[in-house]
Image (cartoon, coloured by chain):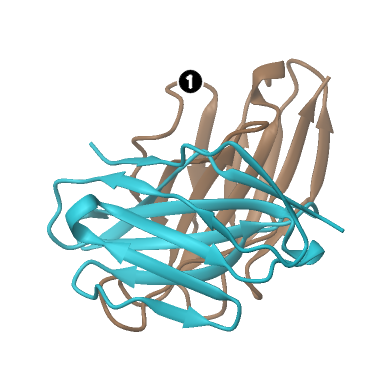
Chain colours: A cyan, B brown
Amino acid sequence: AQKVTQAQTEISVVEKEDVTLDCVYETRDTTYYLFWYKQPPSGELVFLIRRNSFDEQNEISGRYSWNFQKSTSSFNFTITASQVVDSAVYFCALSEAIGTASKLTFGTGTRLQVTL
Amino acid sequence: NAGVMQNPRHLVRRRGQEARLRCSPMKGHSHVYWYRQLPEEGLKFMVYLQKENIIDESGMPKERFSAEFPKEGPSILRIQQVVRGDSAAYFCASSAALPWTSSGELFFGEGSRLTVL
């Protein structure tokens, strides 16, 4: 069965600090996708990144970066120079095949609080 | 997540009433997924539908919950005889191409928040 663990329930940082959100996953599939979503206080889900299991290159997008390590089944997310607007709940998710489509298994989320 | 429309955004029901949540997928999308987010928890898969077909309903509670995606019109998640434990945010997502292709992506709506009094 698929499982996604986000061990950090809540993190508080001061603005401009760097912060890393951890994500560890379990799957028996050899082909899968990993995702990160942001859920701000307004409640919608904002897609951040999708990474397939064959691409272990780290990715950087502005202040965001992702470290995918298949050997440790981890897909960690780092925010550099955090800002108050980064305050949100962040979810890591893993796709599972349903025939030829897929469904997502979400972690329980990490609540990030960035203060001035 | 632009384009997946869910309504109502907020719904209040008393115990025993019925709740109907609607989801219009993005234009051109034929795959719809429903997820439930209980307070302070992550999202849990409920059901995956294609037009007129339920493909996977492994996450649906066995009783009182049903979903459909008719040939015409939005997908409907129906909860009969609601109880307080049904209070949650219900998210709909849609996709076009199969997710294993390079263009496949899941787009989420803004959610419908059900409160059962």
Image quarter where the C terminus of chain A lies is bottom right
Quadrant (top left, top right, bottom left, bottom right) of the N terminus of chain A: top left
B76, B36: nearer the viewer = B36
Badge 1 density bin: few <14, some 14–19, many ≥20, Cα 10 Å: few
Residue A88 visible somewhere in the drawing: yes
Residue closest to the eye, A81 or B90: A81
**Residue depicted at x 61% and y 71%:** A80
Residue B50 shows in the view: no
Question: Mark 1 falls on what kind of element?
Answer: loop
Residue A33 lies, in percent from the top left, at: 30, 63
Q: Is residue A67 above or below residue A89?
A: below
Residue B13 x/y as whole percent: 81, 27
Name the chain under label 1: B
Identify the residue position indicated by label 1 in the image: B63
> Which residue appears at 17% of the width and 63% of the height?
A31
Along the line of sight, the residue nearer the viewer: A64 or A19: A19
Residue A21 lies, in percent from the top left, at 51, 53
Q: Amino acid at mark 1?
A: Glu
Q: Is residue A20 above or below residue A25?
A: below
